[in-house]
């Protein structure tokens, strides 16, 4: 089955929202903190996140966050390669709560369609929430001002 991941994910988010199904656990992190504890201007958090990134993520997402070659083309398995986390990817399209949920649980509903197959691991049993927030702070510290301006328009 051909799924355009980005629109597939957005559509599934939209339908989950429409159905009021977006899990409370996903939203609960929002209370009082719009940034979900992710602060790319916090040098200590970014440094801790870089260590997590190099240990767990760089093998697939690339030492320079560049993703795997031809990351838009499906592998023989039918799954997608790891996308970049820099400006050229679509990580920055996602709100912080979604990014945390993806790293915790992998590509599962409501952030991916039911039965979606992905090589993105779930880190809930491997990384603490602080480590997950830190690795996302590191990734976000690499985004350009242009990407931040676009991201703000998306109200993240
Ligand atoms: C075994 C390879 C692999 C490892 C290791 C890995 N990822 Fe991924 N990741 C993927 C793949 C493949 C995707 C694309 C999933 C899809 O759409 O099917 C992905 C997608 C993502 C996405 C969603 C990007 C988007 O734009 O939708 C995020 C965020 C992410 N990974 C973060 C991480 C972080 C943080 C780590 C380290 C803690 C990590 N990944 C480790 C393979 C990996």
Image: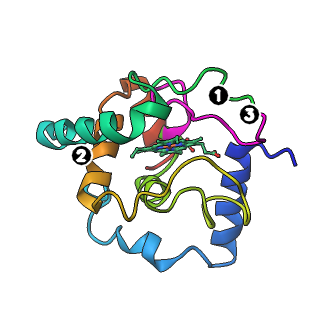
| Dominant secondary structure of the residues highlighted in magenta in the image | loop
> Mark 1: few, some, or many residues within 10 Å (few <14, many ≥20)?
some
Q: Nearer the viewer, mark 2 or mark 1?
A: 1
Query: Which residue is located at x 29 percent, y 61 percent?
Result: 129
Q: Choose the circle earlier in sequence order: 3 or 2.
A: 2
Q: CA distance from mark 2 to mark 1?
A: 27 Å
Circle 2 is placed at which residue position? 39
Q: Nearer the viewer, mark 3 or mark 1?
A: 3
Q: Choose the circle earlier in sequence order: 2 or 1.
A: 2
Query: Which residue is located at x 61 percent, y 63 percent?
Result: 108
Percent across and percent down for residue 142 are 34, 27
Circle 3 is placed at which residue position? 75
Q: Nearer the viewer, mark 3 or mark 2?
A: 3
Answer yes or no: do the residues labelled 3 and 2 have beta carbons within 8 Å?
no
Percent across and percent down for residue 20 are 62, 79
Is the residue indicated by label 1 positioned so its CB lies within 8 Å of ligand 1? Answer: no
Q: Is residue 109 magenta?
A: no
Q: CA distance from mark 3 to mark 1?
A: 9 Å
Circle 1 is placed at which residue position? 71
Magenta-highlighted residues: 76-91
- Please indicate whether residue 123 sits to the left or right of residue 33 in the image: right
Say which of 49 and 23 sits in front.
Answer: 49
Q: Quadrant of residue 147?
A: top left
Q: Is residue 87 magenta?
A: yes
Type of colouring: rainbow
Say which of 117 and 2 sits in front.
Answer: 117
């Amino acid at each position: 089955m051909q799924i355009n991941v980005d629109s597939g994910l957005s559509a599934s988010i939209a339908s989950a929202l429409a159905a009021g199904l977006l899990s409370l656990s996903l939203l609960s992190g929002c209370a009082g903190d719009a940034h979900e504890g992710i602060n790319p201007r916090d040098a200590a958090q970014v440094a801790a996140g870089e260590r997590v990134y190099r240990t767990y993520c760089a093998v697939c997402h690339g030492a320079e966050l560049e993703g795997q070659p031809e990351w838009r083309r499906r592998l023989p398995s039918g799954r997608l390669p790891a996308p970049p986390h820099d400006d050229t990817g679509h990580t920055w399209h996602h709100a912080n709560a979604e990014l945390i949920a993806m790293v915790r649980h992998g590509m599962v509903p409501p952030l991916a369609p039911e039965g979606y197959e992905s090589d993105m691991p779930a880190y809930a049993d491997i990384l603490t929430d602080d480590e997950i927030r830190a690795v996302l702070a590191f990734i976000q510290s690499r985004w350009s001002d242009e990407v931040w301006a676009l991201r703000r328009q998306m109200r993240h």
